Amino acid sequence: MKTLRRFSQNRFFSHLRISAAVTLVAAAAVSAIASFTADPEARLTNDDPALSGYTSDYTLVTGIPYTDAVLMACSQSRGRQNEPAVAVDPRDTAVIVGSSNDYCPVFASDGTFIGLGDVWLGYYRSEDRGGSFKSSLVPGYQGDTSPYAARSHVRTADSGDPVLAWDNHGRLFAGSESSTNPERPTQTFGDVWVATFENPNGTGGATLNDGKEFVRSVDVATGSAAPGLLGKFHDKTAIEVDRTGGSCDGYVYFAWARFTGGGSNGFNSSIYFVRSTDHGQTFSSPMKLSQTVHDIQFPDISVTGNGHVYVTYRQFADVRSNSMVDAIDYNASTDCGASFSAPKVIQAFEPYDPTDLDDSGAVVGECGDFALHCQSGYTFMRGGTQVRSTADQTDTAHDYVYVLYDPSIPGTEVPSGTTYGSIVSEDLPDKYHQNVGSQSGIYFFRLDGATGDHTPPVLIDDSRVRGGLQRFPDISVDNGKMHAIWWDSRNDSCYSPKRPIGNCVDKSTVASLNAFGASGSTATLTWSPSTRLNTVKSNPNWEQFSGRTVPFGGDYLYISSVDTFSYGVWTDWRDVVSGLDPREGTTDTDADAADVHQCRTQNPDGSFTRDMCPWEGGLDQNIYGNTTP
């Protein structure tokens, strides 16, 4: 979600140290899998008066007209969306549902501030295999007075970090973390919750209506109302459903990272887990999985064909955990999520975590203008090494878990020549100025949960050969077919391991990112050549957040598959309208080419008004999707 972005306020990407020597098998495994041609990509977020706009889920289900100020704003806001999720219906691949952090409710249709929260979960529905989408919001947002609003039982003004999963009976589950206390907007709740969508005609209804009707949302864990994200705050969500047809078929599993702030060590984080055995009506009490591991996030959930549950996550190097390296950990359950093993380390790695020093000398994970300016002069969004995992629920013979992650590639380290680095330590002050850049890649391995062994990590597409960075991977596996998606900067004209994505030597920014995908076979563990999924290259460095001062693209992409059919989604900036920031004067004084269109006037005291034309395209960040190899 958009909150908690700077190192000085959180530990999301802290404790970044150069790890001990870690051997990774870097040879790409490429097979002669049939070639794939991407379809024309589709836009999921139709928040533009020239497009179809946003429709209430109540209207999508019943056909009865309903609208409100929020939906009217969303229909023409040309606003921001990021952190997309997507899920293909296992009963009918014509049905695809997407979601995102959707900021369309921020401004009314005339551009004035609505004041009913600033982000909510989108609900984007396709009934033609992703050819087109109808845009909506998960009911229960501030300002929702539809008949479905009363079915929401969550206590928040804002929600984000969407994750999606289907069962085998036409139900779709959407998980989220929530932020602002609507009674006291200076406080954060930090709750996590799960919404359920069903077929309005029941499990026997026409599958084209699967996951269409919002029936409930419930809190599964509550944070503490406190200012500045102190106290308990839940974030970084994951969801999966048992679709095996076994004794635990239909069980819903949900995990997240719980951050506890305000102590002498800053933020602590742990992984928690709940399950529902009644189709999302109720959930178990939260169970802490990470135990003595203190600095972790990015959980993901896998269910194997025999109903065993695995939760993977990233462990940051942390002296309190007696770990001097970053690593991938997991917990295993052989009783359908009722209990779990102790944490086990699978694989250590050298992280790729872009950082810099702000003007005060503090280590930060994003850079922009004014208070968010960094000493290097670069402009870039946050983003650190993540872990994504899944299992093939049709495989009842093995306890295999398939894992992707995006660390630095050993041997690509290079002095950056500036305060920027992708391998930086916050724990060791003498390492602050290592200023080491590197190249990131997408590594893959298969874990055998029954034995704890795993295959050697391999690059699924060796970026060293043709340049560029690879970020934000996701993986889906079904019926022996593997599918992956990631961001790739191989087409970045200014690429260098010394610099952030899309940053040139002169500190300007350029369009640099495409979404790529590949497929593979679980029988051979080999991957096809990669395919570009979008026709338009994006600049991820537009300064659209924190008062138009810093970029933000979320923390993940998403892919979902059923057998050979797969669909992936990504955050996209092709529709952004560039401009000048009047606060910099009559020119782009820092020459970053990252300022967006905005309208401000100067007050007599020298200050400036807020942006008075946010609906004119400066904030037009969107979610796009496409079929993938």
Image: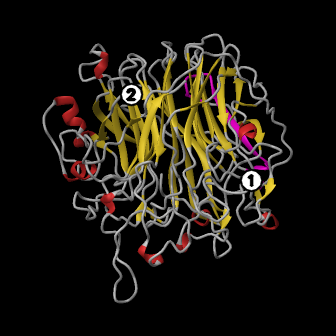
Q: Residue furthest bottom?
A: 605
Q: Position of residue 350 (x, y in %)?
A: 77, 46
Quadrant location of residue 435?
A: bottom right
Q: Quadrant of the C terminus?
A: top right
| Residue with the mark numbered 2 | 130
Q: State the SS at label 1.
A: loop
Q: Position of residue 156 (x, y in %)?
A: 35, 53
Q: Please state which of the two labelled residues, at mark 2 or mark 1, is closer to the viewer.
A: 2
Q: Nearer the viewer, residue 491 or 320?
A: 491
Badge 2 density bin: few <14, some 14–19, many ≥20, Cα 10 Å? many
| Residue with the mark numbered 1 | 318
Q: Is residue 153 above or below residue 212?
A: below
Reply yes or no: does residue 99 show up in magenta.
Answer: no
Q: Is residue 178 above or below residue 483?
A: below
Range of magenta residues: 317-339
Q: Nearer the viewer, residue 31 or 577?
A: 577
Q: Residue furthest top?
A: 397
Residue at the image point whose x is 82% and y is 67% from the top: 430
Q: Residue furthest left?
A: 64
Q: Which mark is residue 282?
A: none
**Which amino acid does the dot numbered 1 rest on?**
Asp
Tell me if label 2 and label 1 are in contact, CB under 8 Å.
no
Whether residue 291 is visible to the viewer of this picture, yes or no, is no
Question: Mark 2 or mark 1: which comes first in sequence?
Answer: 2
Q: State the SS at label 2.
A: loop
Reply yes or no: does residue 329 show up in magenta.
Answer: yes
Total marks in image = 2
Quadrant location of residue 599?
A: bottom left
**Which amino acid does the dot numbered 2 rest on?**
Gly
Q: Position of residue 332 (x, y in %)?
A: 65, 28
Give the distance between the C-alpha atoms of the residues marked 2 and 1, in whole angstroms: 43 Å
Q: How is the image coloured?
A: secondary structure
